Image: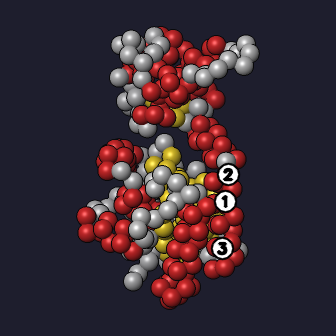
Amino acid sequence: MSARTETAAAGTGASKPGPARGRAAATKSEGRGVQSIELGARLLAALADEAEPLMLKDLAQLAGVAPAQAHAYLVSYRKIGLVDQDAETGRYRLGRFALDVGVARMRMSDPMRLASTAAIELSERTALNVALVVWGSFGPTVVQVQESGAQLNMNTRPGVVYSMTGTSSGQVFHAFLPEKVVKDALRAEKHDAKEDRRVGEERFVSKKDLERIRALGYAAIDKPPVPGISAISAPVFDHAGQMAMAITIIGQDHYLLPRAEAEFIPALLEATRELSAELGYAPAG
C-alpha cells in the first residue's frame, strides 16, 4: 500500500464554577502562597479544559472571576506568551509559551521518557526519523523528533500541530479518540485552516477509512504535505485503554515505501505494542 504523509511545518455569569476551578484549586495548603497566581491559574485551566478559543465573558465565567479582573490577567499573559488573542474575533486561546511549558512537563514525566527511549530505538533500528505526537490543546502535537541522520526536506519539530485529516498522525487520533473529542477538533481545524496553523491540508476521511485504520492498527496517507516524503503512524494506549500518543516514522519515499510492509510497519507496531504494555495497556481478549 502507499504510505505517505506529514513533514512540513506549520503552527461562557461567574456564579457557576466550571472544571477549571477544581483543576486550579490546591488540595492542601503547604504554606503561604501567592493568591493572585492561584486565581490567574483558573483562566489558564479554563482555556485548557475547553480546548477552544473563548470570549472574555465566557472565559471569566468558567474561571469564576469578574470579566474586568480576568482582562487584567489576560493582558499580562499575552505579554509573556501564555495566551494569544485572535485579532478578528477577540477570542483567547493558549499561547506558544503555554505549549512550551506543556511540552516540557510531558518530557519530565515517566511515560514521555519511556516514549523517548522507544523513539530512539526505533529510529536506530529503521534509520528513519521518528516523531512522538500527543494530543495537545490544538490537536495532534509533535513533542519530539528523533532524527536518523538522513537529510530530509522537512522541518517537523516539537510544537508543530498536525491536521486531523491531512496527516497520518492526525488520522490515527481521528480513528482512536472519542467521537466528541474528534468532532470538536475537526471544527477547530476548519477555523484554523484559514490561518494555515497546521501541517497537512484538510481532506475527507470516510467511516471506511477509519475502520481500516482501526483494523490495521496504523495510518498512512497519499498526497503528503511534502512530495517525496512519506510517514506511517500508529497509536500507543495507556492503562485505561485510551490513546496516549502516536509514534510516526518518516522517511524518503524511495527508502520507506519498498520496505514498509515487510520491515518498517512491523517494527513500528512492535514498538507501539511494547510501549503500550509499559504504560499498563492490556488488549481485550
What is the x, y in percent for residue 282? 50, 62
Q: x, y (%) of residue 168?
A: 44, 66
Measured as percent of width and height from the top left, residue 203 is found at: 31, 61
Mark 3 surroundings within 10 Å by alpha-carbon count, few (fewer than 14), some (14 through 19), many (20 or more): many
Q: Are marks 3 and 1 in contact (CB under 8 Å)?
A: no
Give 22 or 92, whichever is nearer the viewer: 22
CB atoms of marks 2 and 1 within 8 Å = yes
Q: Secondary structure at mark 2?
A: helix
User: In the picture shown, does residue 249 fall above or below 189?
Assistant: below
Residue placed at 67% from the left, 45% from the top? Answer: 104
Name of the residue lying farthest toward the front: 285
From what the image shows, is residue 167 above or below residue 194? below
Disc 3 and disc 1: Cα gap in Å?
14 Å
> Disc 3 to disc 2, how far (Cα)?
20 Å
Question: If the image is split into quadrants, where does the C terminus sit?
Answer: bottom left
Is residue 122 visible to the viewer in this orientation of the structure?
Answer: yes
Estimate how packed mark 2 is, as few (under 14), some (14 to 19) or many (20 or more) residues with alpha carbons within 10 Å: few
Question: Is there CB contact under 8 Å for labels 3 and 2?
Answer: no
Mark 2, residue position = 110
Give the residue furthest to the right. Answer: 31
Q: Nearer the viewer, residue 148 or 34?
A: 34
Identify the residue position indicated by label 1 in the image.
114
Q: Secondary structure at mark 1?
A: helix
- What residue sits 39% from the left and 54% below the top? 177
Q: Nearer the viewer, mark 3 or mark 1?
A: 1
**Residue type at the position of mark 3:** Ser
Relative to 189, residue 47 above or below: above
